[in-house]
Image (cartoon, helix red, strand yellow):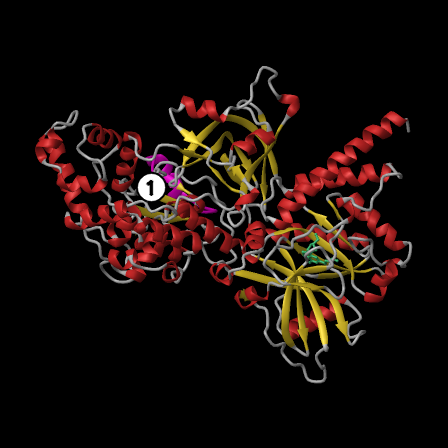
């Protein structure tokens, strides 16, 4: 090898190490990765290949030899008695067979007993039990010591406090049981559906959300977001020799009461293992938990000892990862979406493309830095990936297909073109230690909080369907009311007169009267709609409904403490503080008083779980169901339709509003096509119902069509 060549390689090794170390920090410690797992694995594979080709490269500090570090301040640290390692991984069957060949050198094929299990995409954990009693749970940490996350364990389904006693089998005095904490896909979708209804940015995948949850020092976080666990391995065990194989361990773990993956194949030889990997890739489509591959490990502990460990991973096991589905499309535009807090999020508008079973046409680009880091330009061909099989991301552009004349995207220019005045606020790096200085945050926020444009948007939001539902108050009316000084805050609506409305463009007696009637009727929407309408940051329809259900009156909500608010399911610290802050502002209190004085009902009416009239999204609609839906049973779909004010009919006619079609839909579907009636699938149906119903039964994995919260009623409210 020429020295130039070597120098080039050493340079690349250095760059890769720095880049991977940065990504490790983001993934393990911050639970907020910048790139997809697949892109990360590609970088790591490149580093390993280069290190292998450069025998002089000093490996001692390379991230290729370490397990990452998830330790965080605020948690007590404990040493693992047996270190927690990582796994080597591959995406290629050839490399997997190479692994088998290495095993074959020491073991005759008939002795090569493998377990093939799903690789659960969560966070590794070590559960420690002494004489059958739970002692503590540790994260992997740096492999040597981990964070004590025991405070979350009572909230994690399936971790026994006391192991079930099995006659004739005394408990080990001490045992480290290794496994994974994860979030079911259904729970992830439930949380995201709610965030969508509340106009918040969606979480990217269940793994990050799991990591973020257990990194919280507040056990309420894990209570609100339901986490689960599976166990599969062993660390230290006293007395030694209690187990001789993983399959024996597995049987014992099941008897002790732990949850185990249903899929676990015990096979002889590499070919048979490869067959199981393929089966698993198929089977995992029906799993209710995220998997990103298969783990193949020697079953017998005596065999494992023959091969031993490297610094960061055992030689007796390997992860075979399934490449995520990717697709190429064109980035048509980058649009700006203004969130309810005034946050401006860039969105990739894509030529529609099929990825892992759904059509993707939009994807969040997170913030300005993200676009710059990926150097995305309008017109680029881009790669879309559905990591965690759920939320599509723009991974990168395709350099070979870039138009050389294309120019970088300027966020500032885009804001200017849209006439939006915005800023990137500055905050303390560590609020507890101001001496550490300040930093500019990644997101842009609207600068002015009370311009006519914002007042008008606020009014439009107040009048929108899920809020006060004032049918004739659209964009033009809202803008005129504000521009003419007739309305400054929504409470002014209730003082409008017929004559004032007659001054609006194109308004005649009938339209003025209709609007007046709509305003009058809106007084009785009830507390849930009102709480949504006034625009408390982080509170949307779903949260407003739950808060209204519990507190019943606006006064009770206004005087609730953050702790009391957090008793409502789904209300975390951020939302609770946001509500407290809202009512602490005299301007907002005054606005609420004015609404009350104008006769707006500030109590929740009706039965505890009744759906407010304004939220009856299917009112006046007749549905026809046909075919088999992927997750919902017929009567479940019917119940949802009826709950939200719709009707279900058996046959398609001109009166049918929507046909909800599943697989093997027959003549009804044809008739609907002939009559030009709207036809939707289950995913679209679930998206159109409010969040509480948009998550089907566990095990179901509905596809989110569009990961970006709908911008239409995403109005800035302060
Ligand atoms: S066995 C020495 N089995 O994947 C490590 N690990 O990327 C032996 N994982 O750190 C691990 N599912 O947290 C094993 N069925 C499974 C697994 C699994 C997920 C995790 C584990 C490990 C990581 C490596």
Q: Nearer the viewer, residue 365 or 401?
A: 365
Visible residue check, residue 632? yes
The residue positioned 26% from the left and 37% from the top of the image is: 459
Tell me, yes or no, whether the highlighted magenta stretch contains residue 465. Answer: no
Tell me, yes or no, whether the highlighted magenta stretch contains residue 670. Answer: yes
Magenta stretch bounds: 662-679
Quadrant for residue 606, please give it: bottom left
Badge 1 residue CB within 8 Å of ligand 1: no
Q: Position of residue 214 (x, y in %)?
A: 57, 58
| Rendered position, 411 above or below 631 | above
Secondary structure beneath disc 1?
A: loop
Quadrant in which the C terminus appears: top left
Q: How many marks?
A: 1
Q: Is residue 518 found left or right of 15 in the rendered image?
A: left
Q: Position of residue 342 (x, y in %)?
A: 39, 37
**Outermost residue, front side:** 435
Q: Position of residue 280 (x, y in %)?
A: 67, 53
């Amino acid at each position: 090898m020429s020295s130039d060549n070597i120098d080039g390689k050493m340079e690349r090794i250095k760059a890769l190490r720095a880049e991977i170390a940065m990504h490790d920090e983001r993934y393990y410690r911050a639970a907020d990765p910048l790139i997809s797992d697949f892109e990360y694995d590609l970088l790591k594979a490149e580093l390993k290949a280069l290190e292998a080709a450069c025998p002089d490269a000093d490996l001692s500090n390379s991230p290729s030899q370490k397990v990452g570090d998830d330790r965080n301040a605020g948690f007590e640290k404990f040493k693992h008695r047996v270190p927690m390692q990582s796994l080597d991984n591959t995406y290629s069957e050839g490399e997997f067979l190479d692994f088998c060949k290495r095993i074959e050198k020491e073991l005759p094929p008939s002795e090569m007993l493998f377990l093939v299990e799903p690789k659960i995409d969560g966070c590794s954990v070590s559960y420690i039990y002494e004489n059958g009693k739970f002692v503590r749970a540790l994260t992997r940490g740096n492999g040597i010591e981990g964070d004590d996350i025991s405070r979350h364990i009572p909230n994690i389904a399936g971790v026994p406090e006391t192991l079930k006693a099995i006659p004739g089998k005394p408990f080990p005095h001490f045992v480290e049981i290794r496994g994974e904490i994860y979030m079911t896909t259904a729970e992830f979708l439930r949380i995201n559906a709610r965030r969508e209804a509340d106009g918040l940015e969606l979480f990217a995948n269940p793994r990050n959300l799991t990591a973020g949850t257990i990194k919280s020092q507040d056990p309420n976080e894990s209570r609100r977001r339901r986490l689960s666990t599976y166990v599969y391995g062993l660390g230290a065990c006293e007395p030694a020799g209690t187990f001789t194989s993983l399959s024996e361990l597995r049987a014992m773990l099941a008897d002790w009461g732990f949850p185990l993956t249903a899929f676990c194949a015990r096979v002889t030889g590499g070919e048979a293992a490869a067959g199981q990997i393929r089966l698993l890739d198929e089977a995992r489509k029906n799993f209710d938990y995220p998997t990103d591959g298969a783990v193949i490990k020697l079953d017998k502990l005596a065999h494992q000892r023959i091969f031993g460990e490297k610094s960061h991973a055992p030689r007796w096991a390997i992860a075979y990862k399934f490449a995520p589905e990717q697709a190429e499309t064109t980035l048509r535009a980058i649009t700006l979406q203004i969130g309810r807090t005034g946050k401006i999020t860039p969105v990739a508008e894509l030529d529609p493309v099929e990825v892992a079973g759904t059509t993707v046409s939009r994807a969040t680009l997170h913030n300005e830095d993200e676009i710059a880091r990926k150097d995305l330009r309008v017109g680029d061909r881009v790669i879309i990936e559905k990591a965690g099989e759920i939320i599509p991301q723009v991974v990168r552009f395709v350099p070979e297909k870039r138009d050389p004349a294309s120019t970088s995207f300027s966020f500032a220019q885009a804001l200017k073109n849209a006439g939006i005045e915005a800023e990137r606020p500055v905050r303390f790096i560590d609020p507890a230690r101001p001496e550490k200085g300040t930093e500019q945050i990644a997101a842009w926020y609207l600068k002015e909080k009370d311009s006519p444009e914002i007042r008008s948007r606020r009014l439009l939001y107040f009048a929108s369907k899920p809020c006060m539902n004032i049918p004739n108050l659209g964009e033009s009316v809202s803008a005129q009311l504000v521009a003419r000084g007739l309305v400054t805050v929504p409470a002014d609506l209730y003082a409008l007169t017929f004559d004032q409305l007659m001054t609006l463009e194109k308004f005649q007696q009938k339209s003025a009267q209709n609007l007046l009637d709509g305003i009058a009727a809106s007084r009785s929407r009830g507390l849930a709609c009102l709480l949504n309408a006034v625009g408390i940051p982080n509170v949307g329809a779903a949260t407003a409904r739950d808060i209204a259900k519990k507190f019943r009156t606006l006064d009770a909500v206004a005087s609730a403490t953050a702790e009391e608010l957090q008793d409502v399911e789904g209300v975390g610290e951020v939302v609770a503080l946001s509500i407290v802050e809202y009512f602490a502002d005299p301007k907002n209190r005054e606005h609420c008083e004015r609404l009350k004085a104008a006769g707006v009902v500030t109590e929740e009416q009706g039965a505890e779980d009744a759906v407010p009239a304004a939220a009856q999204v299917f009112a006046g609609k007749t549905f026809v169901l046909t075919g088999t839906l992927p997750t919902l049973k017929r009567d479940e779909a019917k119940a949802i339709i009826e709950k939200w004010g719709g009707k279900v009919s058996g046959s398609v006619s001109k009166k049918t509003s929507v046909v909800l079609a599943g697989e093997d839909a027959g003549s009804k579907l044809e008739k609907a096509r002939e009559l030009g009636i709207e036809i939707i699938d289950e995913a679209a149906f679930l998206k159109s119902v409010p969040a509480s119903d948009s998550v089907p039964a566990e095990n179901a994995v509905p596809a989110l069509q569009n990961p970006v919260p709908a911008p239409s009623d995403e109005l800035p409210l302060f």
